[in-house]
Amino acid sequence: MTDQEATPQATPNEGRRLSTREAAELLGVKPETVYAYVSRGQLGSRRGPGSRGSTFDAKEVESLARRNRREPAAPSTSGELSVRTRITLIDKDRYYYRGVDATELALAHSYEEVAEWLWTGVMRPGIRFTAPEETADAARRAVDALPEHSGPTDRLRVAAISAAAADPLRFDLSEEAVIGTARTLIPTLVTALPLANRTHRDDGPLAHRLWARLSARQPDDASLHALDTALALLVDHDLAASTLAVRVAASARAHPYAAVSAGLGVLEGPLHGAASGLAHRMLLDVLDRGSAAPVVADELRAGRRVPGLGHRLYPGEDPRAEALFALLEAFPDAGPALAAARDVVATTARHTDLHANVDLALAVLTASSGMPAEAGETIFAVARTAGWIAHALEEYEERPLRMRPSGQYAGLRPPQPMPESAPGSAPDGG
């Protein structure tokens, strides 16, 4: 019997195995190409008991076949990186999760339900994410050991690292295992944060547990719904900088905790996750000074952009801001902050055609809920973790290490002389 005709062998409870010939037929390639896939790390193989030929996991072959059948990505006309994804579509001032209007989804379903939909394509009403007590305790201890001045992203990164260290199965990158990790990692990140008010109930939907860590106020149903909706609105937004970092990590087959840590590292930048904190402080300044005009003038005089305005993907108003503002209209405590936000938009509209973005809406929510300025960054990070997991799941199905651009060297051409030591830098012989 030749290698190509070898009959695959299977043991009880093992996945179906394919022969080289069967794998080649499924992939639509020659048997030699199957082995090329193996050498490039795109397929695993092993010898079956009593067989002279290699066998291949059927699910892995089918996944590779699906990737090969997809149309090639459209070439980028702007010189920017283009990555194919089935998660989020942004089109004509709207955005969609798996083809469903994201704002409608966020208003009708909890954050956990939207996250589950993004990962699996299945809506599971009432789903709750819970953290294993041992993992949550370890994460809390690690976060509590940080200096008092640590920022929210510092705490979340440490919590993610602690949760990873407590999970011996973190290197299992199967879809089922990664989704299981996500269902425990997200509540672990929340549980690890210090409580703002120890009298709050620390149970229920994730938004309820997060509120207890962001505000000392007792929330009403409208407040909790606004926070839950904000989380769902922020789950994903195409290839933002932090999401690209997650996909690069996943391309190198980093486990999901490490991929999320990569996203958190990028999120901390003032042009990304921290932007709502800048908008929050600006709104407080407007309320303190009674008008947006001097505040906007100060921002522009300092050479800064006015926080919370404009988005490169939306010529009109950011639909996330539109949905969140509509909810906050019915939120009695949000009146002053909403008026300040409108004043900022109206003041800048005299000279520029910039609309409110989600950072300004998030700042209204945090400023009117008794939350600190950094709360928006926390909300953003917790929310976006679900989207990062969705992108990691997609990237784990792609060819390993494909997110590897080539550098264009612009330095001195070799050969160059060996550098001389700087004066006075020689080691002391004594």
Image (cartoon, rainbow, N blue to C red):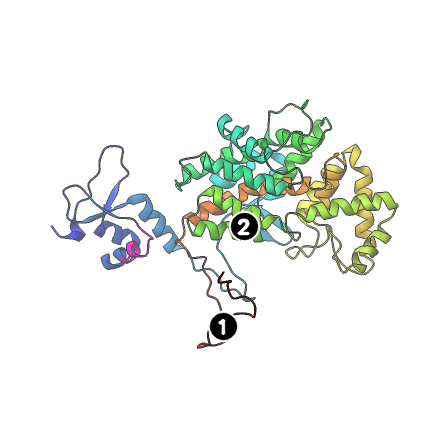
Q: Which residue is mark 1?
A: 419
- Furthest residue in direction right, as rendered: 290
Q: Nearer the viewer, residue 9 or 251?
A: 251
Give the structural element (helix, strand or loop) at label 2: helix
Residue 279 painted magenta? no
- Residue density around tag 2, few if under 14, some if 14–19, many if 20 or more, within 10 Å: many
Q: Residue at x 49, y 56 (%)?
A: 83
Q: Residue at x 29, y 56 (%)?
A: 39
- Residue density around tag 1, few if under 14, some if 14–19, many if 20 or more, within 10 Å: few
| Left or right of 82 in this view: 200 | right
Q: Which residue is mark 2?
A: 243
The answer to whether mark 2 and mark 1 are in CB contact below 8 A is: no
* Residue 295, x across and y down, in percent: 83, 52
User: Does residue 110 show up?
Assistant: no
**What whole-number distance in Å separates the C-alpha atoms at marks 2 and 1?**
40 Å
Residue stretch in magenta: 36-43
- 168, above or below 318, in the image: above
- 399, above or below 231, in the image: below
Q: Residue at x 82, y 43 (%)?
A: 339
- 53, above or below 77, in the image: above
* Residue 94, x across and y down, in percent: 63, 50
User: Does residue 202 show up?
Assistant: yes
Name the kind of residue labelled 2 in the image: Thr
Report the number of discs: 2
Residue 38 painted magenta? yes
Q: Residue at x 33, y 46 (%)?
A: 60
Q: Nearer the viewer, residue 131 or 335?
A: 131
* Residue 75, x across and y down, in percent: 49, 64
